[in-house]
Amino acid sequence: MELTGAQIFLECLKREGVDVVFGFPGGAVIDIYDELPNYPLKHILVRHEQGAIHAADGYARATGDVGVCLVTSGPGATNTVTGIATAYMDSIPVVIFTGQVPTPLIGNDAFQEVDIVGITRPCTKHNYLVKDIKDLAYTVRQAFYLARSGRPGPVLVDLPKDIMQAKYEFVWPEDVTLRSYNPNLKPHVLQIKKVAKLIEGAERPLIYAGGGVISSGAEDELTWLARSLNIPVTATLMGLGAFPGTDPLWLGMLGMHGTYAANMAINNADLVLAVGARFDDRVTGKVSTFAPKATLVHIDIDPTSIQKNVAVHVPLVADCKSALSALKSEMEPNLDAVDWEVAHAVWVRQVQEWSETHPLRYKKGENKYIKPQAVVEKVYEISNGDAIVATEVGQNQMWTAQFYKFKRPKSFLSSGGLGTMGYGFPAAIGAQMAFPDKLVVNIAGDGSIQMNIQEMMTAVCNNLPVKIVILNNGYLGMVRQWQELFYNRNYCETCMDAQPDFVKLAEAYGAAGYRITEEKDLEPVLREAFANKKPVIVDVRVDPEENVYPMVPAGASLTEMLLV
């Protein structure tokens, strides 16, 4: 049957199983919005296009499904670029649909025209400009396929207005084949055998888990490997939740603000099994001194990530779940031949000793201020570790990563690679849309929460009871910390003493607002706030000069940690 381009587009979304679209209308996409009420799609009207892409990203991280956003041409499209780059750096499956001026006007500097395909080429997995309505359905199908397969990532589809108005017979493409794109999912059998032999011969093995474990759904296989073979586990920021944060083998996050035990373990391990991680500079510190005693095994679905930052001894290009499943199958038949608890007992005792002698800690009760770490600990205690937690970027992000024990995958939403301030709140909205009955908490700083605070109206209008807990220290905290430690306390332009009354601001939007200035009020007020059915802002006044420790200075080795 003949349909308009707008109808074909919406029919494709329906066939892909899309249930929610985050968007903002405009002239170039008005034909789509004209048809939207006729389709079983929930549209969430955001208040800024950056909110749309971050919400789609948060939805994708929390569910594992593809997030979708729809914006208009020109400034609508360019307002999504930061969010697209955020998803690209963290390998999040999002499809972004942007309106475009009619095809005869492309290249003429028409009103609200921008080359969004050119602009986003470096920060998308792939992008398309649809030039012919005959290609529309297959292009949308390809976009979703590319976004979710292989190493996930954002895909952009640019939709000219005249294509949305044209008519063509709709045919749903059941299969997608791309000759130049065939991700390798299965591990090489000989490489698996080699890894198994290395594990059998290792005295000090360590698992280093990244976000790829979560995106491939390999958390069960990883947990089996660690517990069955008595191997300690550390993770990147993106890997938090891949292994239970309450397990005795858990060392915490590694890297610049990682735990003492995790950083010492990777420095002393004789075998490091890196799974779905990319050896980011915030993890490795000084590359030449990273894991100096270890044989490095690197499992990743993206061949360009292997050998990119660190030379590895055993590369394994495969889906993390497939690789760990194959490794389990290889080792399981002879599991009883070795007493793994005894084999690695000395090593496990050593890493546990590091954890006991240098735990994550902070100086309690040294002044009149609430400690931000205590706030995160209280959020964990009240939620019993069962919340979906989003963060902004900076000190709030690191304290959350350190002091909230993530027990499950897809429960931590944070901008890791790009470090995008303003990410957390709209991402939390996306997660709350996916799980309306779960507690969703955004732990924020007073600086970054103001970057997308307008999305409070989105939360209120859609009855999304997101809880924002602001660690309000009156500074751009992480930059201030660097200024204190490395720039002789020259706090240039990091003081945020001029800020809104966050309680009144919440109330102005129709949300609920609370303020906490004394530690004795922390638990009762947070419990009341979390029980509130409205979106909530909790403004917690915390120590203005509290720092995140441990900290590895830029360019230093992981063992050169600054401690409390």
Image (cartoon, rainbow, N blue to C red):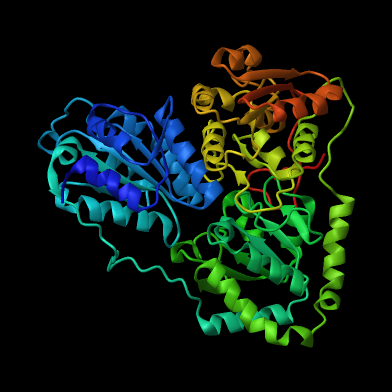
Q: Relative to residue 551, is residue 330 depicted above or below?
A: below
Using the rendered image of the protein, determine whether residue 393 is visible from the camera's viewpoint.
Answer: yes
Q: Relative to residue 232, is residue 355 depicted above or below?
A: above
Locate residue 16, reporting x and y percent. 36, 53
Using the rendered image of the protein, determine whether residue 490 is visible from the camera's viewpoint.
Answer: no
Q: Relative to residue 278, is residue 271 depicted above or below?
A: below
Foreground of the two, 319 or 476: 319
- Residue 290 appears in which quarter of the rendering? bottom right
Locate residue 545, reporting x and y percent. 75, 25
Decide if residue 391 is on the left or right side of residue 459. Answer: right
Decide if residue 221 is on the left or right side of residue 22. Answer: right
Decide if residue 50 is on the left or right side of residue 413. Answer: left
The residue positioned 85% from the left and 56% from the top of the image is: 354
Locate residue 281, reporting x and y percent. 58, 51
Decide if residue 415 is on the left or right side of residue 395. Answer: left
Locate residue 434, reporting x and y percent. 53, 42
Residue farthest toward the left in the current orientation of the protein: 104
Number of disc labels? 0
The residue positioned 55% from the left and 67% from the top of the image is: 320
- Residue 376 appears in which quarter of the rendering? top right
Quadrant occupied by the C terminus = top right
